[in-house]
Amino acid sequence: MARRLLVVDDDPILAFLVAEWLMEIGCEVVGPARSVPAALELVEREGVALDGALLDVALEGEDSYPIADALALYGVPYAFVTGHGIGGLAPGYRDAPALTKPFQFEDLQRMIDGLIALRGRERAE
């Protein structure tokens, strides 16, 4: 069964690349969403059916933290994607996994493996 991953990024080229890479490793892509409202709508619709999410931190002038909070309500693990590194995350979110742009396919694959493993542990509890 394909793992369902939400992709949230306002850069259409990067979102397309990430979606392609995710499909290459056997994931089903939900989205990509380009804004906070669009992503929140997908989270509300998909909820616990999601296995994980990749969230660009800055979306059209807004932060993606409300999306992270909504995902947490459903127990869906997420990772931030940022050009500013971990230090660029708000203090309450610095413990979340993060990919720093630019990243390679292998970096994304390791991150997804970690999210899937985390989701598996949460579902087992």
Image: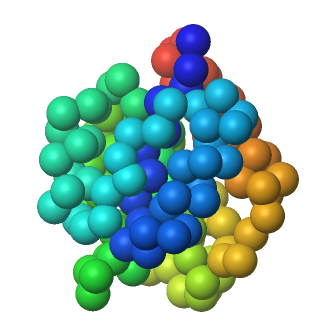
Q: Is residue 113 left or right of residue 116?
A: right
**Residue found at x 60% / y 59%:** 17
- Please name whichever residue, 19 or 83, is drawn nearer the observer in this view of the structure: 19
Q: Is residue 81 left or right of residue 42?
A: right
- Assign the N terminus to one quadrant of the image: top right
Residue at image point 58% right, 31% down = 27
Residue 24 falls in image quadrant: top right
Residue at point 31%, 65% (across, down)? 34
- At 33% from the left and 76% from the top, the residue drawn is 59
Pick the front one: 24 or 60: 24
Identify the colour scheme used: rainbow
| Frontmost residue, 1 versus 43 | 1
Q: Position of residue 45 (x, y in %)?
A: 19, 33
Q: Position of residue 111 (x, y in %)?
A: 70, 49
40 to the left or right of 109: left
- Figure check: 95 above or below 20: below
Residue 58, quarter of the rendered image: bottom left
Q: Say above or below: 84 vs 123.
A: below
- Residue 30 visible in this rendered orientation of the protein: yes
